[in-house]
Image: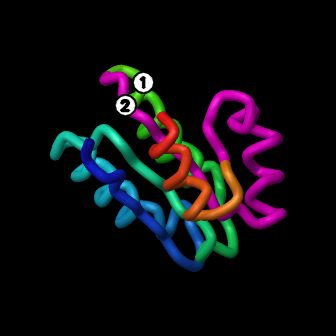
Amino acid sequence: MESPLIVAPEGRLDSNTSSGFEKEVRELLAGGARRLIMDFSGLDYMSSAGLRIVLLAAKRMKAISGKLVICGLNDTITEVFEISGFLASLTVVADRNAALRAFAEA
């Protein structure tokens, strides 16, 4: 089974910076990625623009029976995910090692 691909944006993920991350994610999805880890441990801040990219990836993975695992959320970003309701519908784990284990167990 193929190893999951990992994307790990750093700094801020907002309307000014999200286009590069969105391009990277879209290219991975277009390239046939079926197993994806989004590691947000390097992020300080995420706005709704970042959440939109997560939602885009989650919908694509669901449509192709793929798997998306999110990890490395700091307290501020966890709150953004909670308020949006994303924590209930996404696989969110503590760190990259836990994310890799989530694929090994699948």
Residue 6 point in image, percent of width and height: 39, 61
Mark 1–mark 2 CB contact (< 8 Å)? yes
**For numbered disc 1, what is the local secondary structure?**
helix
- The one of 17 and 26 positioned closer to us in this rendering: 26
Residue at 73% in and 38% down: 87
Identify the amino acid type marked 1: Lys
**For numbered disc 2, what is the local secondary structure?**
loop
Residue at 78% in and 54% down: 78
Residue at 30% in and 60% down: 24
Q: Which residue is mark 1?
A: 62
Q: Is residue 42 magenta?
A: no
On residue 66, which mark appears? 2
Q: CA distance from mark 1 to mark 2?
A: 6 Å
Q: Is residue 49 visible to us here?
A: no
Identify the amino acid type marked 2: Gly
Please state the extent of the stretch shown in magenta in the rendering. 64-92
